[in-house]
Amino acid sequence: MAHHETHGSTKSYTIGFLLSIVLTIIPLVLVLNHMLSRVPLIVAIIAMAILQFLVQLFFFMHIREGEKPRYNVMALILGAVITFTIVAGSVWVMSFNEQVH
């Protein structure tokens, strides 16, 4: 039995590519032109990073497609939990180590 994997169309890849370019240029322009103060700039950069992540998932990694997309989402959530745990633990250890000195 042949298994046919679904892939995105040229239109889908083009839209994803253009969105990725735009979501990369926006923070670059904000930083280079000093358009926002520190906190709003950081919020804007993080917002663009999250949107970029979602574009990558939906347009290039086809997270919504497939026979069992639920497993893809569960694997993604597990990866996010592990990543968050490592980053949060590292920040906590570094901030604790700084207070000792």
Image (tube, rainbow, N blue to C red):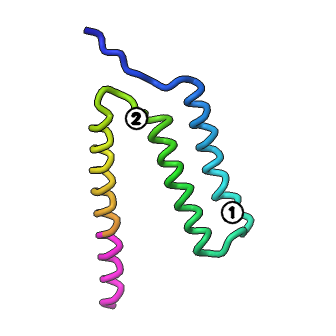
Magenta part of the chain: 89-101
Residue 14, quarter of the rendered image? top right
In space, the residues marked 2 and 1 are separated at their CA atoms by 32 Å
| Camera-nearest residue between 28 and 15 | 15
Query: In the rendered structure, which disc, 2 or 1, sits on the residue that comes first in sequence?
Result: 1
Q: Seen in the image, is 24 located left or right of residue 101? A: right
Q: Quadrant of the C terminus?
A: bottom left
> What residue is at 31 percent from the left and 15 percent from the top?
3
Residue 99, quarter of the rendered image? bottom left
Q: Are marks 2 and 1 in contact (CB under 8 Å)?
A: no
Foreground disc of the pair 2, 1: 2
Classify 10 Å Cα crowding around label 1: few (below 14), some (14-19), many (20 and above): some
What residue did someone put label 2 on? 64
What residue did someone put label 1 on? 30
Q: Secondary structure at mark 2?
A: loop
Residue 2, magenta (yes or no) = no
Residue 13, quarter of the rendered image? top right
Q: Quadrant of the N terminus?
A: top left
> Magenta region, mostly helix, strand or loop?
helix
Q: Secondary structure at mark 1?
A: helix
Residue type beneath disc 1: Leu
| Camera-nearest residue between 62 and 21 | 62
